[in-house]
Image: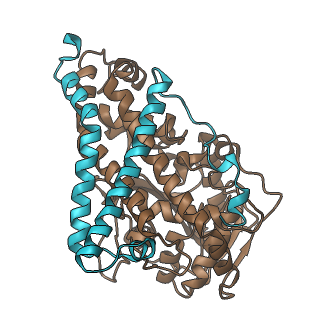
Chain colours: A cyan, B brown
Amino acid sequence: MSTAASKLGTRLRVQKGRRTVPGDPRIDTLLNMVMSLTSEVAVLRDRVDAHERLAAAGVVPAPDTVDAYDPDDAALKARAAQRQRLIAKVCRPLVAEGSAEAAGAAETH
Amino acid sequence: MSAARVHPIMPTSTHDEVAEQMFVVALKSFIAAEMDPALRRLSQEVAGTLPVAEGESRPSLQQLRRGVSSSPLYRNWISTMRAAQELMWQAAGDCVDRQLDELDHIAAAAPSVGTVRTNPDFVVPRYLAATDTHMMPGSYHTDPTPTDVRQGAVFDKAAALYSLGRQGGQMNDMRGHTIVAHVRERFPDLEVRRVLEMGCTVGNSLVAVARNYPAAEVQGIDVGAGLLRYAHARAALLGVPLHFSQQNAEETDFADGSFDLVYSTAVLHETSARAIKRIFSECHRLLRPGGVMVHLEVPFRAEHADNFDMLRADYETRYNNEPFWIGAVSADLAELARTAGFEQAAAGYQDAAAVAPQSGQHFAFGGPNKGVYRSWYVVSGRKAVS
């Protein structure tokens, strides 16, 4: 942590004037937490990917070799597809709910 | 997106930070590809059940908002949009904080090219101080110390992420190129020796404009000291002499007639109804006779919007802390320019220039809206010669 960064405090962590979303605010909070957690899963997937590709290339995966790993185009493409699959999976209920509503099926639930 | 820097003070990203940033980009893309169309369908359906006032093409925003407000899709869309925005700022903030000492050192050691003038007594306009604009914690103006470059570094890092790299990549300079393209299109005879950008943030556009007018003296003003310290170092390291000062665009300390060209990019929607008028008047004061004012705005107009577009504008206004978004996209900007005393005042869609316009290249003004990052909405006018 740098000198200025250590002086941040909460002012630079929380936005001034953040408005509440309609409905139960806990749902908004929970959705935020799910997205943050999904972000962590995405980071872990890429890290696992680095481990596997380094091992396949005969390099011992260690914190420094993983941090220094620079994915080639094939790896970037595979990671992008994996990331999209992850987001589509986690967010599927949000879109499915919308499709049902837009089709006028919401009232039948 | 990896370690390669487009300029020496751009924050670098570790393996995991890249992964975090790419997640934000992918989430924003998912919302645009999957959630927006679902909400567009719902908003059309709900609007079909609502009364439309005589002379209007769609129900009022208030009615539409009330109509969809109990919908889980609408609520989840707001939450997901804002979560993506907040993750973006968090990712950029964490990345910068890890290396802030190094960035401060790079700024301090930057070549003495151009100048920066901050003002410890500067009063941030109320419309910017009241909320953190577009959910950036601390907004443009809250610095952790009186000497660091944090807010500028965070803004630069996040801005390239926000536009998904489509505003000129990591240089994020498409808006500057588009200003040049517009001036050439509408005012090809304008001789540009002195330029001012209002609300220049980290100088993304200003560097592009200055490179197009290499002999000009180029000034940029903004409300954040850390933002400007970063902007100055960034430009100096790119070898472009720019002069930055911490000032309010409504009331600057430059003398009358100081500039040939005064412009802003995507600034008006972050001001207020009163401030826009004052900014246009200040532009008029600052220009020499025959000088030109240009303001570039988001390519979105209330009069051309459908129901979903209005919900999107409402999101920006209420949930992404852009309180004047709807006000700016509804205002008659050409009329405001005329009222401020400008001649040849006109507003319309301007074809975007992704890279520096070449001589003889044509970028149409006043044509159709070609969409985000392909068009911008621009108002411009000229100060009378006599």
The location of residue B79, given as percent across then percent down, is: 42, 35
The image quadrant where one finds the C terminus of chain B is bottom right
Residue B290 against residue B368 in the figure, above or below: below
* Left or right: where B336 falls relative to A65: right
Residue drawn where x is 40% and y is 42% of the image: A35
Residue drawn where x is 18% and y is 17% of the image: A105
Is residue B90 in view from this perspective?
yes
Seen from the viewer's position, the closer of residues A57 and A93 is: A57
The location of residue B151, given as percent across then percent down, is: 62, 61
Residue drawn where x is 67% and y is 61% of the image: A5
The outermost residue toward the right is: B121
Seen from the viewer's position, the closer of residues B133 and B287 is: B133
The location of residue A97, given as percent across then percent down, is: 24, 26
Residue B318 against residue B147 in the figure, above or below: above
Residue A82 against residue B54 in the figure, above or below: below
Residue B140 against residue B132 in the figure, above or below: below
**Residue B174 is drawn in which quadrant?**
bottom left
Is residue B257 in view from this perspective?
no
Q: How many marks?
A: 0
* Left or right: where B315 falls relative to B233: left
The location of residue B246, given as percent across then percent down, is: 72, 64
Seen from the viewer's position, the closer of residues A7 and B25 is: A7
* Left or right: where B180 falls relative to B33: right
The image quadrant where one finds the N terminus of chain B is bottom left
